[in-house]
Amino acid sequence: RISEKIEIALNDQMTREAYQAQVYLSYASWAEINSYTGIATFLYKHAHEEREHMFKFIKYINGRGGETKIEAIKAPPANPANIGDCLNKVLDHEIGNSTHIDNIVNLAHEEKDWATFNFGQYFVKEQIEEEALINSLLDKYSLASTDKSHNVNFYDLDKDLSSASQEG
Ligand code: OFO
């Protein structure tokens, strides 16, 4: 069975994944209203992915003799100012989230809880992919905003995003 300390840490992360989904959902809705259809599609899809992460935590906690506690999810932050701000904020959220995942893996290592250590590796990999993905979108965004000779513009960027993979 997972220890009480691990159970609390996993529960906190489960709620955090639900919060991440809320963040993506609110930014997606903002993008949709502002006619950034592609980025809205991308962000809506990613909201689903974060909810899947939440479910993975629920299943793992319950499957290892713990008990999931479903709690209130805090409200998402204010709308971004523009696409660049949106992507930067998404990246900040993911970087913050990576730190929390690392803390869980570290705790599992300290406790020699190899099942949780192994479970955490999935998310370590996932966070590497997500940070790389958002970074690549930010690169495209800065090309679109600064270098016209690259033939990248906001319209193409937005169109690209509607079909962008959720992986880095
Ligand atoms: Fe961003 O992957 Fe879950 O948290």
Image (cartoon, grey):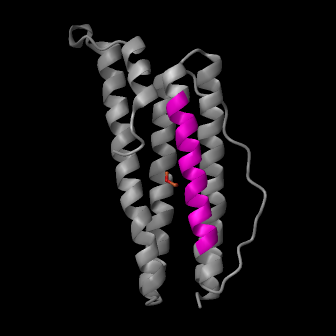
- Where is 16 relative to 146, above or below? below
Which quadrant of the rendered structure holds the N terminus?
A: bottom right
Residue 163 lies, in percent from the top left, at 41, 29
Is 164 displayed left or right of 64 in the figure? Answer: left
From this viewpoint, which residue is outermost toward the left? Answer: 149
Residue 145 lies, in percent from the top left, at 35, 15
Is 89 displayed left or right of 125 in the figure? Answer: right
Q: Which residues are magenta?
A: 41-59
Which quadrant of the rendered structure holds the C terminus?
A: top left
Which image quadrant is residue 44 in? top right
* Residue at 66% across, 38% down: 77
* Residue at 64% across, 25% down: 30
* Residue at 57% across, 22% down: 81
- Where is 111 relative to 16, above or below? below
- Where is 80 relative to 132, above or below? above
- Which secondary structure class fits the magenta region best? helix
Task: Decide whether residue 45 is among the magenta residues.
Answer: yes
Residue 140 lies, in percent from the top left, at 32, 25
Q: Nearer the viewer, residue 138 or 29?
A: 29
Task: Decide whether residue 168 is among the magenta residues.
Answer: no
